[in-house]
Image: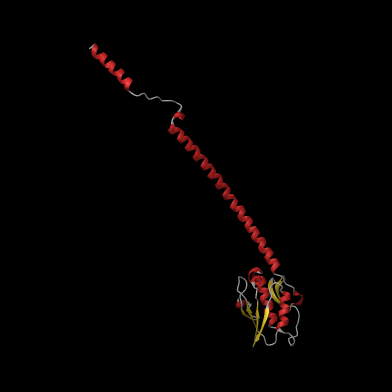
């Protein structure tokens, strides 16, 4: 009995010697996997913070940039309009302008002309002096129609705005239909946003025709 107990005791000691010991330590930083995870966590935190800062910066700057671009565009349009609608009425025959009292656009005759001596060449000079940035060329007449061309129509169709282009077209049409026997004026130019070539008369801009 004593021998069996001693044998069992020796077996326990032998197992204790051969069994690999597991040492738990509070210093986890000595573990390679822990070091890798720690570094990965630090890296991910840095990346997330960086992306957050980039998002905040990009979400604010486009608004400022957009506002700046809109402001620049509005200023450019204002400058273009002011510089393009150059009208000198001193020698003009007809004028299309806004009436402050009636709050409507109206056609107004500025002076009378002698139709017997009036020519297409004279009207060309008058129109080109009245509208120095929109130069026309008188082509001729046929039956009841006069013909003009505008070699460079970009100012008329792109820079004067709708009101400016309309003022030019109407005043020019009314002026040329002062010629004896002329009821229509044919415009020849490259079409744009604010001007369309074609044949016009004094009734072309009536409300019923628009």
Can residue 108 be seen?
no
* Visible residue check, residue 119: yes
In depth, the one of 100 and 36 nearer the eye is: 36
Q: Is residue 21 left or right of residue 122?
A: left
Q: Residue lying at the far left in this picture: please name it.
A: 1
**Residue at left 28%, top 16%?**
10
Drawn side of residue 66 relative to residue 113, left or right: left
Q: Residue at x 63, y 79 (%)?
A: 187
Q: Quadrant of residue 194?
A: bottom right
Can you name the residue that lies furthest to the top here?
Answer: 2
Query: Split into 4 quadrants, where in the image is the N terminus?
Result: top left
Q: Nearer the viewer, residue 174 or 203?
A: 174
Image coordinates of residue 6 in percent, x first then y, are: 26, 13
Indicate the position of residue 89 as horizontal and vertical percent values.
75, 74
Residue in front for this viewpoint, 124 or 33: 33
User: Where's residue 148, x and y in %?
Assistant: 66, 80
Q: Nearer the viewer, residue 85 or 99?
A: 85
Residue 23 position in % (x across, y down): 40, 24
Which quarter of the rendering shows the C terminus?
Answer: bottom right
192 to the left or right of 12? right
Q: How is the image coloured?
A: secondary structure
Give the total of numbered labels: 0
Image height check: is 81 above or below 64? below
Please report the residue visible at 47 percent of the width from the left and 35 percent of the height from the top.
38
Which residue is most to the right? Answer: 90
């Amino acid at each position: 009995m004593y021998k069996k107990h001693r044998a069992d005791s020796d077996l326990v000691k032998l197992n204790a010697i051969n069994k690999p010991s597991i040492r738990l330590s509070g210093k986890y930083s000595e573990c390679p996997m822990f070091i890798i995870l720690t570094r990965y966590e630090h890296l991910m935190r840095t990346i997330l913070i960086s992306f957050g800062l980039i998002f905040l910066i990009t979400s604010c700057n486009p608004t400022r940039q957009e506002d700046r671009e809109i402001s620049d565009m509005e200023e450019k349009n204002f400058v273009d309009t002011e510089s393009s609608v150059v009208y000198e009425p001193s020698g003009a025959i007809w004028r299309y302008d806004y009436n402050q009292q009636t709050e409507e656009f109206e056609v107004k005759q500025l002076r009378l002309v002698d139709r017997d001596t009036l020519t297409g060449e004279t009207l060309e000079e008058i129109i080109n002096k009245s509208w120095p940035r929109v130069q026309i060329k008188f082509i001729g007449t046929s039956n009841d129609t006069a013909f003009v061309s505008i070699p460079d129509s970009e100012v008329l169709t792109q820079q004067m705005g709708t009101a400016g282009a309309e003022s030019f077209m109407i005043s020019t049409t009314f002026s040329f239909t002062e010629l004896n026997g002329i009821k229509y004026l044919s415009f020849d130019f490259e079409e744009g946003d604010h001007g369309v070539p074609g044949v016009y008369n004094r009734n072309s801009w009536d409300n019923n025709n628009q």
